[in-house]
Amino acid sequence: MSGLYIAGAGASGMMAAIAAARSGAHPVIIAGRTAPGKKILMTGNGRCNFTNLRMKKECYHSAWPDGPMKVLRSFGSRDTIAFFREMGMLSCERDGYVYPRSMQASSVREVLLGEIRKLKIQMIEEDPLKAAALSEDGGFLLTLVSGKTLSADRLIMCTGGMAAPATGSDGSGLEILKTLGIKIIPTVPALTGLLSEDPCCSVWHGVRTHGRVTVCDRSGKPHSDTGELQLMKNGISGIPVFQVSRHTAYVLKDRPAAEAIVDFMPEEDADLRKILDRKDLTAAEALHGAFPIKLAEVFLKRLGVRPDTAVSQADPKKIMNMIHSFRLTVRAVRNYEEAQVTAGGVDLRSVDLGTMESRNIPGLYFAGEILDADGICGGYNLQWAFSTGYTAGVSAASYMES
Ligand SMILES: Cc1cc2nc3c(=O)[nH]c(=O)nc-3n(C[C@H](O)[C@H](O)[C@H](O)COP(=O)(O)OP(=O)(O)OC[C@H]3O[C@@H](n4cnc5c(N)ncnc54)[C@H](O)[C@@H]3O)c2cc1C
């Protein structure tokens, strides 16, 4: 049977299938080894932050920074909200972050699966795509893990990256594309924690505190984010760390270590300065009023100051410097098992972003995390999956019709 095949039944694959079927095609989904949409259930701590009303270029990273918005402008967050509403799912919004009204990720998955059933889209389950080769008639010869072969006129690759491989995204799609000569930007785990062997980690383990983290990318450009930091026994985590982790991951591809600089008081610090100048407080007493006890202990240990030293004798300027620029040597980022997304993937410059079709291989389309675009936290990655899935589905179907 030839026709339109979609490899992958995640957010992008299901969207591509629905868009293609509504455009008159009869797509067949080749689902992976896990249940369709399994990853969606994990998103947003089970609540699925599926898009964001605040869309701008800076919300995405890619080797072609202007690329992502080209797709997002043609199918954006309001289109996604309307698309789900039309299928019966209501949404709610807080500060631009959009969730299903039920606050349950299962709503997103269920409406997508329901629409797939309604449109009678065929799904080949538990038999992933193993290989794809170009056939002489301009189509593709697909081989599944079971050994079954299929002939396809069009193929949309929606197999994701390598993040959370327990959900089925094991990078096999990227390997298949490499055999077809598709240019892949090297991949790293992103939206994840930073690992450090600094002795301070064993002291601050378990502390959650407000701060700003800054890391430099490979060109030396600093990237910062502010919010709740989670201080762990083997490093640092939390949303601000997630937001900058991809830059550290790329630095660590070339170097054995990277550095994160943490500002533990990014807000106005005049009151703390006054406290550090007081004559009647020890160093420990002065710090305990502003920081968790374990963190104050870390500051004093690093400075070699005894807790019972008078704070005015302990060089308040040095303490302040440490609070604002705490340097942490980072040896690694957490692995793909713990990362929320993959940075890198199919080079956007090799894709027609109006159709999501390969510029080099006609009939081959891409959608979702398999592409070189990773969003910041906040619904941007699912929106990317939906925007690219919709565009690829409609375009591949229109070709089938012509
Ligand atoms: C813990 C966690 C929380 C997250 N929270 C959010 C959030 O709140 N908001 C947000 O926007 N993003 C979030 N993300 C990111 C978001 O979930 C992904 O970017 C998005 O789901 C990617 O969709 P996708 O369809 O491209 O890939 P995936 O969802 O990874 O789906 C790929 C599919 O392809 C299948 N597959 C793989 N290889 C093959 C093959 N060879 N043949 C056939 N099928 C194959 C897999 O089984 C899988 O079903 C989160 C991710 C994680 C891990």
Image (cartoon, rainbow, N blue to C red):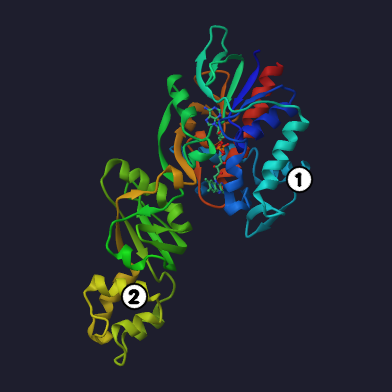
Mark 1, secondary structure of its residue: helix
Front-lying residue, 185 or 292 = 292
Give the amino acid type for the residue marked by disc 2 in the picture: Ala
Tag in front: 1 or 2 = 2
Query: Which residue is under mark 2?
Result: 296
Q: Residues within 10 Å of mark 1 (few under 14, many from 20)?
A: some
Q: Which image quarter is the N terminus in?
A: top right
Can residue 332 be spotted in the picture? yes
Can residue 61 be spotted in the picture? no
The percent coordinates of residue 127 (x first, y second) are 57, 25
The percent coordinates of residue 398 (x first, y second) are 69, 22
Query: Alpha carbon of mark 1 to alpha carbon of mark 2: how far?
Result: 50 Å
Give the amino acid type for the residue marked by disc 1 in the picture: Arg
Q: How many marks?
A: 2
Indicate which disc, 1 or 2, sits on the residue closer to the N terminus.
1
387 vs 89, left or right, is left
Residue, x 67% and y 47% (percent of image)? 106
Q: Tell me if residue 169 comes above or below residue 237 in the rendering.
A: above
The percent coordinates of residue 333 (x first, y second) are 37, 49
Q: Residue furthest bottom?
A: 280
Q: Quadrant of ligand 1?
A: top right
Front-lying residue, 352 or 271 = 271
The tag on residue 85 is 1
Q: Tell me if residue 150 comes above or below residue 325 in the rendering.
A: above
Front-lying residue, 192 or 30 = 30
